[in-house]
Structure formats: structure tokens, C-alpha cells
Image (tube, rainbow, N blue to C red):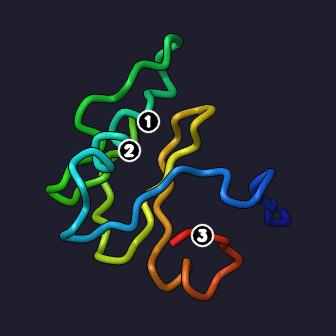
Amino acid sequence: MALATIGTNANNSLSAIVYGAGDADADVASVALGILDDQNVTHPVYPGAFSKQGLLYIPNRGYLKPLPGDYIAFDAATGWPILISARAAASGPYTHNP
């Protein structure tokens, strides 16, 4: 069995924040509202998927603990959350702003 490959269709195609103590409430709310339930056919916003308390909930799968500097992103088309570590964002094949 071979590994699959995956990438984005365009640079900067995900909406994201850099997690840390200075996150603006509006930015946190935008991420929280962007995370959708992929198992519900109406794909509603998943309440409590992300907050300033530092837990990212992957709907129907579980919690992840972001660390300061990690990127918390979501795909606007599907609402799928994506966590990218600060190290991977700094040295991986990611284009980001900031």
C-alpha cells in the first residue's frame, strides 16, 4: 500500500488564526463559526468547536490541544478544521500570512 498525497488547490485557500493569548474575540468567533459538522447532512456550525480556552474540537472525532503559534485553519467550502503546528508552518510547504 502506498501513501496518498494531498495539497491545497491554491495558496492561502484556508482561513486561519495563529493561536495565542492575543487572539481577538472576533477572530476566534470566525473560526468557531467556520467549523461545520461533516456527519450531519445539513452541515450545521458545530457549537463549541473552538474557543479561547485552547481546545479545538474535530466534529465527531475528538479534541486537539493547540499550542501557541500553531495555525488553526478551516476549509471555508466544507467547514473542516485543520491544525498545523507552528514548526510545520515555519518550515513546511505552507504559504501563510502572517
Number of numbered discs on residues: 3
Q: Quadrant of residue 89?
A: bottom right
Residue wearing tag 1 = 34
Residue wearing tag 3 = 96
Left or right of residue 69, residue 94 in this image: right
Left or right of residue 75, residue 58 in this image: left
Mark 1 or 3, closer to the camera: 3
Spatial CA distance of label 1 from label 2 is: 5 Å
Q: Amino acid at mark 2?
A: Val
Task: Determine whether label 1 and label 2 are within 8 Å by CB.
Answer: yes
Q: Amino acid at mark 1?
A: Gly
Residue density around tag 3, few if under 14, some if 14–19, many if 20 or more, within 10 Å: some
Sequence-wise first label, 1 or 3: 1
Residue wearing tag 2 = 31
Residue density around tag 1, few if under 14, some if 14–19, many if 20 or more, within 10 Å: many
Left or right of residue 57, residue 76 in this image: right
Identity of the residue drawn at 56% across and 69% down: 97
Spatial CA distance of label 1 from label 3 is: 18 Å
Spatial CA distance of label 3 from label 2 is: 16 Å
In the current view of this chain or complex, which residue is farthest to the right? Answer: 2
Q: Amino acid at mark 3?
A: His
Task: For mark 3, give the secondary structure.
Answer: loop
Q: Quadrant of residue 54?
A: bottom left
Sequence-wise first label, 3 or 2: 2
Query: In the figure, 93 relative to 79: above or below?
Result: below
Identity of the residue drawn at 24% across and 55% down: 24
Identity of the residue drawn at 50% across and 11% down: 42
Task: For mark 2, give the secondary structure.
Answer: helix
Q: Quadrant of the N terminus?
A: bottom right
